[in-house]
Image (spheres, helix red, strand yellow):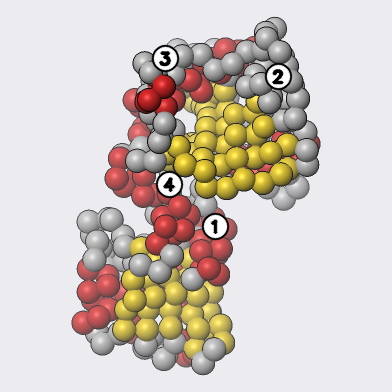
Amino acid sequence: MGAALTLSERTRGRTAPNPNVGCMLVRDGRVVGRGWTDVDGRPHAEAMALAAAGDDAAGATAYVTLEPCAHRSSRGPACADLLIAAGVERVVVATGDPDLRTDGQGIARLRAAGIDVVAGVRQDDAERAMAGFLTRTRYGRPFVTLKLAMSLDGAVARLDGQSRWITGPAARAHGHLERSRHEAIVVGRGTAEIDRPKLDVRLPGLSSRSPMRVVLSADCADMAGFVMLPSIAALGDLPGDHVLVEGGAATAAAFLRDDAVDRLLLYRAPILVGHGRTLPDIGLTDLEQAHGRWRLHDARMLGSDRLEVYERAR
């Protein structure tokens, strides 16, 4: 399942409206097929893995990060039917599909065909890998990641607004990798007007994955190259399932104030700014509200900077 989860990450941010799924087919201790949801959502991971396995799929075990779909589409058959037709003997599923067209029916169909099904293997990891699809399905909006770079004393910029560069090259490269995993990137009007940021991906081999540039403003008629997001409440109108918020401080605070952040990337540089700019009001009326909202998922060093990844506890 770990290998299937890794495969599912290959096209994260490029499969909407379909989920990014990974699939491994194993027979007699040997991998006979690998698959992942392709760009724009087709073929599905199971279809790709079965095509690679051919006749070796008969009697194999399929490890799939999402319940195989049970509904037919004009773009292809149901994956549950494909697995049955291929003679797969066992299916291990990480998490169920909340899409009402499947939602348990895929597993039920496999079991009715005599296939042994095990569900719930590494479910948390699978839901994290497909957070965009699941958030869109459950809440009607994309999964939002907020990126913050700050000093040891909590400054996101000097008082004069200077913020280049708080972090070092390794942290900035990681930020570009994160951009490549999102369909849209949001900044505030002030950042867009003053900095005119490119917001592209400047990593070798990944420049084609630059996200759509979005400005949080009710009026950006003069902002060529930007898509307008009139309000945070309109997030659901953006295409894709993954949105990265990069700034500035007022925009970051607005997303936090509206409780519209699902994941927080905190890049902490080993510098002191002193009397710098910090986040403005995020809507807390007392400290008790601040506790229990975020849980640490990952932490690592990027050169001399420390990255901490937090998830919103919902």
Taking the image as drawn, is residue 157 in sight?
yes
Q: What amino acid does circle 2 point to?
A: Ser
Q: CA distance from mark 1 to mark 3?
A: 34 Å
Q: Nearer the viewer, mark 1 or mark 3?
A: 1
- Label 2: how many residues lie within 10 Å, few (<14), some (14-19) or many (20+)? some
Mark sitting earlier along the chain (1/3): 1
Residue 156 image offset from top left, x and y in percent: 64, 20
* Quadrant in the picture for residue 265: top right
Mark sitting earlier along the chain (2/4): 4
Q: Residue at x 62, y 45 (%)?
A: 299
Q: What amino acid does circle 1 point to?
A: Glu
Q: Are marks 1 and 2 in contact (CB under 8 Å)?
A: no
- Residue 9's mark? 1
- Label 3: how many residues lie within 10 Å, few (<14), some (14-19) or many (20+)? few
Q: Nearer the viewer, mark 4 or mark 3?
A: 4
Q: Residue at x 51, y 92 (%)?
A: 28
Q: What amino acid does circle 3 point to?
A: Ala
| Residue in front for this viewpoint, 157 or 33 | 157
Taking the image as drawn, is residue 76 in sight?
no
Residue tagged by mark 2? 163
Residue 65 image offset from top left, x and y in percent: 43, 65
Q: Which quadrant is the C terminus positioned in?
A: top left
Residue tagged by mark 4? 132
| Residue in front for this viewpoint, 301 or 34 | 301
Residue 111 image offset from top left, x and y in percent: 25, 80
Q: Are marks 4 and 3 in contact (CB under 8 Å)?
A: no
Q: Residue at x 62, y 13 (%)?
A: 277
Q: Nearer the viewer, mark 2 or mark 3?
A: 2
Q: Secondary structure at mark 2?
A: loop
Mark sitting earlier along the chain (1/2): 1
Residue tagged by mark 3? 218
